[in-house]
């Protein structure tokens, strides 16, 4: 129960309508091709790490680029090859540009205007333009608001110069193919490049996974055809490489729909890879055929290719070697701000615990963390999940004795968040991250340090719970609230949280005096204006009473479909919610336990409800979420609120309409750890006051009823 980004509530609400509009808008020349999606994007600035330039060209209308609050600002995309540009679609967030230009360039240095305005009105702008270049830029000179420039999507349409030479032959057929995994011996990687539409490759049922083919020599790749089996990829990249180790994205999507996908790409390499980050089903990835087409314009890779997100361990039997192994560090923090943040916390596979260097002696360079793998090992992959105090320059080093070290990887351009370093060829009993330049004035801090390879003395980490198949149909919990009028919630299912609320709320939660059946198949949680003597709320004794109930003592679950039909309360100062809290809350505390807000409503915004997730790296006003709006007031009727939740994503629904999906791979790569792979329990409450809704005022009406028809969980 925490608000979305403070100060941007109006912008979020306004922009939701723009997103819906954008989904129906086409380019100025409908016959032309979308050239910009998944290409390399850069910008003059970003507001924060959660709004990078790449978010404007990812095909996801729920992610955005936003700039610093100043003029001028720009966003540019490298199309990968010279193109004739015929249309640009700008899907603005509420922070739009009043005066801006669209420009093209052959070299990203000399620019030509193809569109200019001083009367931009925001929303979705579909612009007919005419120009040629490899690079296309939005150049803003005057903002319309006090914020910066913010785009949900920046889409460039046209055609690549000279691409009519793209061949139709399949250059991948019969070539050597490898994969991150195979489902079984009957679905090998080679089956996707054998030219037989009746055989297929299929992977293990987890994310990420990949399939790659060796074309035999460096070749210009202009097209890829994916013939999916039912188990398709929703989010994936097509990548090329000259050596099978360093990869460059030539296509990216988060909205794959399966079937047969004919993709226009532009890149050069000997190896071509499908890299999947989010599956479309509970199964793995499965392709009847992976066809690669060559010819067209020869281009060099983009100057700043995007790093590949979190791959699976390398093929050949690699396992996690580092789980719960002994660790040492240059120093560690143990104070009120990070209690017991020793090096072992980075080796426990718990994304909510971390190692950090000492706040008194460790905010210096160098800083390091080392793990003893227990025996000599061959090291192929390392995954670093950084806290905001990350290393911009560091080495990965191995040693046989923990004293003499050999560098197997080095960078001076570390970007933080989740960094996956593949293609390593190191050996030793010990491996360490040796940081030489910090990203800020603090020390080094890391949620996870995972090492993959062969040998060592590995301890197998606990397996994740089984993914549900959606739509989930096995009912594992329900309460229909069919008791007689005046009866309290089933004590075998629900426990009453009593006492004052949190978040500066003004109510006192009673022992179910405010939570009773109405005799018509509903539980009613009533907020009343009445004082609780001896209580303590902001300003003195609590002036309101209400109810909050949970299933912490009776039911918790990991993954599935949770749903409730609710008629919310609605007046200034009310804050009803249906949400999940990590079952480890008593020991881990908030926000380390994780929180999943399926529905929150605040009376001051009658036409909106909100779904948000919270974790140590993003919480409160910085949580990851989205509103859902209607034409009327949510308090006027019952609505169904739900979430689908599995290992790789959550999708939130209102009345069966999916409006917000958050993907694990994207969160880890842009915001921080995903802390939702463990049991959660259910909470229902009807809060009064608090940081987000504010206090009741002269317009507020009491009592206020939150009516719940049912709560159900399926797996």
Image (cartoon, rainbow, N blue to C red):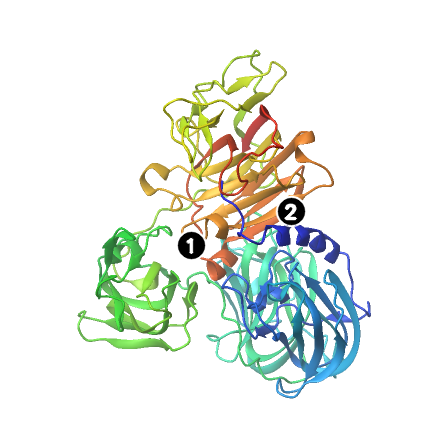
In the image, 358: left or right of 125?
Answer: left
Query: Cα distance, mark 1 to mark 2?
Result: 24 Å
Q: Which residue is mark 2?
A: 659
- Identity of the residue drawn at 56% across and 29% down: 712
Is residue 105 shown above or below 206? below
Is residue 663 shown above or below 499? below
**In the foreground, 263 or 46:** 46
Q: Position of residue 711 (x, y in %)?
A: 56, 28
- Identity of the residue drawn at 55% across and 23% down: 526
Is residue 250 shown above or below 678? below
Q: Is the Cβ of the residue at disc 1 closer than 8 Å to that at disc 2?
A: no
**In the foreground, 121 or 196:** 121
Q: Position of residue 633 (x, y in %)?
A: 69, 36
Q: Residues within 10 Å of mark 2 (few under 14, many from 20)?
A: some
Is residue 463 shown above or below 287? above
Q: How many marks?
A: 2
Label 2's element? strand
**In the foreground, 209 or 347:** 347
Q: Position of residue 477 (x, y in %)?
A: 51, 27
In the image, 515: left or right of 105?
Answer: left
Pointer 1 or 2: first along the chain: 1
Q: Residues within 10 Å of mark 1 (few under 14, many from 20)?
A: some
Q: Nearer the viewer, mark 1 or mark 2?
A: 1
Residue 322 visible in the displayed image: no
Q: Position of residue 413 (x, y in %)?
A: 42, 76
Residue 535 visible in the displayed image: yes
Q: Quadrant of residue 172?
A: bottom right
- Identity of the residue drawn at 36% across and 24% down: 534
Label 1's element? loop
Q: Which residue is mark 1?
A: 617
Q: Which mark is residue 161?
A: none
């Amino acid at each position: 129960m925490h608000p979305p980004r403070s100060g941007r509530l109006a912008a979020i609400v306004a922009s939701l309508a723009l997103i819906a509009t954008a989904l129906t808008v086409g380019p100025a020349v409908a016959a032309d091709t979308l050239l910009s999606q998944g290409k390399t994007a850069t910008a003059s600035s970003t507001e924060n790490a959660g709004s990078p330039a790449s978010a404007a060209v990812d095909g996801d209308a729920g992610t955005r680029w936003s700039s610093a609050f100043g003029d001028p600002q720009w966003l540019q995309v490298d199309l990968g090859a010279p193109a004739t540009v015929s249309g640009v679609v700008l899907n603005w967030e509420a922070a739009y540009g009043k005066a801006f230009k669209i420009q093209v360039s052959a070299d990203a240095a000399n620019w030509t205007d193809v569109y200019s305005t001083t009367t931009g009105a925001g929303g979705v702008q579909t612009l007919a333009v005419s120009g040629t270049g490899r690079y296309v830029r939005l150049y803003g000179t005057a903002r319309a608001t006090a914020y910066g420039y913010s785009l949900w999507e920046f889409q460039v349409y046209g055609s690549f110069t000279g691409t009519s030479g793209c061949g139709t032959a399949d250059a991948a057929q019969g070539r050597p193919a490898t994969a991150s995994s195979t489902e079984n011996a009957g679905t090998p990687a080679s089956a996707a490049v054998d030219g037989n539409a009746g055989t297929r490759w299929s992977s293990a049922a987890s994310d990420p996974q990949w399939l790659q083919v060796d074309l035999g020599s460096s070749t210009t790749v202009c097209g890829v055809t994916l013939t999916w089996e039912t188990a398709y990829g929703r989010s994936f990249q097509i990548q090329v490489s000259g050596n099978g180790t360093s990869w460059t994205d030539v296509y990216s999507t988060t909205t794959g729909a399966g079937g047969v996908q004919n993709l226009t790409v532009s890149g050069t390499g000997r190896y071509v890879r499908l890299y999947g980050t989010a599956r479309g089903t509970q199964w793995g990835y499965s392709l009847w055929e992976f066809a690669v087409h060559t010819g067209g314009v020869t281009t060099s890779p983009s100057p700043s290719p995007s790093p590949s997100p979190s791959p699976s361990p390398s093929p050949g039997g690699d396992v996690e070697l580092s789980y719960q192994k002994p660790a040492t560090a240059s120093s560690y923090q143990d104070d009120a701000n990070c209690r017991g943040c020793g090096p072992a916390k980075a080796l426990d596979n718990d994304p909510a615990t971390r190692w950090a260097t000492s706040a008194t002696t460790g905010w210096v360079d160098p800083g390091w963390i080392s793990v003893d793998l227990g025996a000599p090992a061959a090291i192929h992959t390392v995954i670093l999940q950084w806290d905001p105090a990350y290393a911009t320059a560091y080495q990965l080093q191995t040693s046989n004795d923990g004293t003499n070290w050999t560098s197997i990887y080095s960078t001076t351009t570390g970007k933080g968040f989740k960094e996956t370093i593949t293609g390593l060829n190191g050996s030793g009993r010990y491996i360490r991250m040796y940081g030489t330049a910090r990203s800020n004035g603090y020390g080094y801090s890391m949620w996870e340090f995972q090492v993959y390879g062969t040998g060592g003395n590995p301890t197998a980490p606990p397996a994740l719970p089984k993914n549900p198949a959606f739509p989930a149909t096995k009912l594992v919990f329900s309460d229909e609230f069919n008791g007689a009028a005046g009866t309290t919630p089933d004590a075998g299912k629900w426990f009453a949280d009593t006492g004052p609320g949190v978040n500066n709320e003004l109510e006192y939660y009673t022992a179910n005096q405010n939570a009773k059946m109405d005799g018509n198949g509903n539980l009613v949680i009533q907020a009343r204006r009445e004082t609780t003597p001896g209580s303590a709320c902001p300003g003195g004794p609590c002036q309101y009473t209400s109810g909050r109930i949970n299933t912490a003592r009776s039911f918790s679950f990991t993954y599935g479909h949770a749903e409730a039909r609710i008629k919310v309360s609605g007046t200034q100062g009310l804050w009803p919610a249906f949400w999940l809290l990590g079952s480890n809350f008593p020991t881990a505390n908030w926000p380390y336990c994780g929180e999943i807000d399926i529905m929150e409503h605040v009376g001051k915004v009658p036409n909106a409800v909100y779904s948000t997730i919270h974790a140590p790296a993003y919480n409160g006003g910085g949580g990851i979420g989205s509103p859902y709006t209607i034409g009327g007031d949510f308090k006027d009727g019952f609505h169904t609120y739900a979430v689908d939740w599995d290992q790789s994503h959550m999708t939130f629904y209102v009345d069966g309409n999916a409006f917000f999906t958050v993907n694990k791979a994207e969160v880890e790569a842009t915001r921080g750890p995903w802390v939702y792979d463990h049991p959660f329990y259910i909470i229902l409450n009807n809060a009064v006051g608090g940081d987000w809704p504010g206090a009741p005022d002269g317009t507020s009406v009491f009592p206020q009823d939150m009516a719940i028809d049912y709560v159900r969980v399926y797996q």
